[in-house]
Amino acid sequence: MAGDHECCGILRGEADRVSAVELAQNVAADPTRHFEIDPAALFSAAKDVRSGGIPVLGFFHSHPNGMAEPSPTDIAQAAPDKHIWLIIAAGAITAWQPVVVGAQVTGFTPVVLMKEG
């Protein structure tokens, strides 16, 4: 992991199956408390998708504080879309999807993860 800093990245795949995980640089002003996926990584992924690459399914980040659930900051900064969010904390990975009301994220709902292989 990233020690006391939050790590982050992009999840790519088809339908509801993640087939690629791309680690990205955390460019947040305070990476010990927040994450911001490097805009260059997001741009690169979007450009790749437009040219036929694997679709972006969602994103991941860690919570060094050990809380494996979305924080108020996660809710405030989430885009009002249906991307999946994985949170890595305390040796566990949890999955979440934004709850969107109008054009605003009001929370997250848990998503069941299934491991293959």
Image (tube, helix red, strand yellow):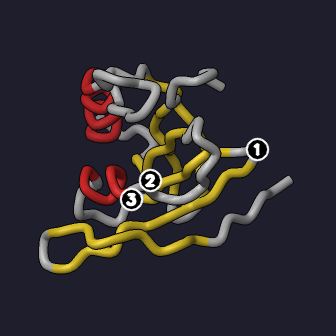
- Place of residue 21 in the rendered image (x, y in percent of width and height, measured from the top left): 57, 36
Residue occupying the point 36% across, 52% down: 74
Q: Is mark 1 on a helix, strand or loop?
A: loop
**Given the image, on which type of amino acid does mark 3 rest?**
His
Q: In this view, does 64 lie to the left or right of 31?
A: right
Q: Quadrant of the N terminus?
A: top right
- Place of residue 23 in the rendered image (x, y in percent of width and height, measured from the top left): 52, 27
Q: What element carries label 3?
A: loop
Residue tagged by mark 3? Answer: 83
Q: In this view, does 46 lie to the left or right of 71?
A: left
First in residue order: circle 1 vs circle 2: 2
Q: Which of 39 and 67 is in front in this view?
A: 67
Is 29 rendered above or below residue 88? above
Q: In this view, does 11 lie to the left or right of 101?
A: right
As drawn, the label of residue 91 is: 1
Crowd class of label 3 (few under 14; some 14 to 19; many from 20; radius 10 Å): some
**Given the image, on which type of amino acid does mark 1 rest?**
Gly
First in residue order: circle 3 vs circle 2: 2
Residue tagged by mark 2? Answer: 57
**Given the image, on which type of amino acid does mark 2 rest?**
Leu
Q: Which of 83 and 34 is in front in this view?
A: 34
CA–CA distance in space, label 3 to label 2:
6 Å
- Place of residue 83 in the rendered image (x, y in percent of width and height, measured from the top left): 38, 59
Is 105 rendered above or below residue 75? below
Q: Nearer the viewer, residue 113 or 104?
A: 104
Q: Is mark 2 on a helix, strand or loop?
A: strand
Is 16 rendered above or below residue 62? below
Task: Say how many tags the image has.
Answer: 3
